[in-house]
Amino acid sequence: MRTLLLPLLFLALVGCREQRQELGQAMSGKPPVISGSLEGEWQIADLNGGGSVAGGSLMFDPGDQGTSRVSGTAGCNRFNGAWKQDGSTLKLGPFASTMMACPPPAMEVEQRVVALLEAVNSVSYTQAGEAILAAPDGRKLKLMRAPKP
């Protein structure tokens, strides 16, 4: 009887811990993290708190049999690479890019976007359905679903 009681007690404590975490998050006023998938088309809504990226968009294609690809633009060149999402863990790149000459401000923004995408290691979602891609150093890229045509 005692050997059966210990696993049941453990399961009850684990369940209580999860409920305490949910209650703590609800009481903190922070919106809950909503899971999801990056599959589909997104617009770049914010680059590290500096506002949207003009013409910035990403397309996450799940592909077949492990050939998931991401492609996009940050307003100048087109780039593409691999992507893999496992829950909140995210791996992007390496990226290949076209090499068109663009005005220096556009090139600078594009370089910041691609560097951030290559550093990203996690994704979370807001209640509004936005995706937040985050790098370990705190840089973030917020994405909004592209409007349906």
Image (tube, grey):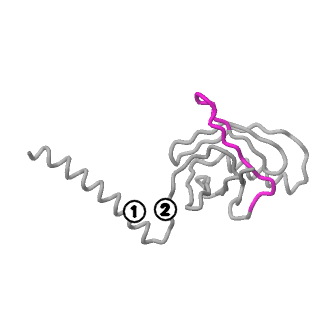
Picture quarter containing residue 143? bottom right
Instruction: Check the picture and name the quadrant holding the N terminus.
Output: top left
- Residue 123 placed where, x, y %? 57, 51
- CB contact under 8 Å: marks 1 and 2: yes
Q: Residue furthest front?
A: 149
What residue appears at the point 23 percent right and 51 percent down from the top-left corner?
A: 10
Q: From this view, report whether residue 149 is shown above or below residue 71.
A: below
The residue beneath circle 2 is 32
| x then y, percent, for residue 30 | 50, 68
Front residue of 14 and 137:
14
**In-image side of 134 versus 23 (left or right):** right
Q: Is residue 18 left or right of residue 34?
A: left
Q: Residue at x 61, y 58 (%)?
A: 138
Which label was assigned to residue 100?
Answer: none
72 vs 30, left or right, is: right
In the image shown, does 34 or 99 lie closer to the viewer?
34
The spot of residue 81 in percent (x, y) is 70, 37
Measure how far apart labels 1 and 2 are at the Cα level.
8 Å
Residue indicated by mark 1 = 22
Residue pictured at 34% horizontal, 61% vertical: 19
The disc, 1 or 2, on the residue closer to the chain's N-terminal end is 1
Q: Is residue 142 above or below residue 27?
A: above
Furthest residue to the left? Answer: 1
**Within-10-Å neighbours for mark 2: few <14, some 14–19, many 20+:** few
Give, as a three-letter code, the residue at label 2.
Answer: Pro
**Segment tinted magenta in the rendering:** 52-69
Mark 1 residue crowding within 10 angstroms, few (<14) / some (14–19) / many (20+): few
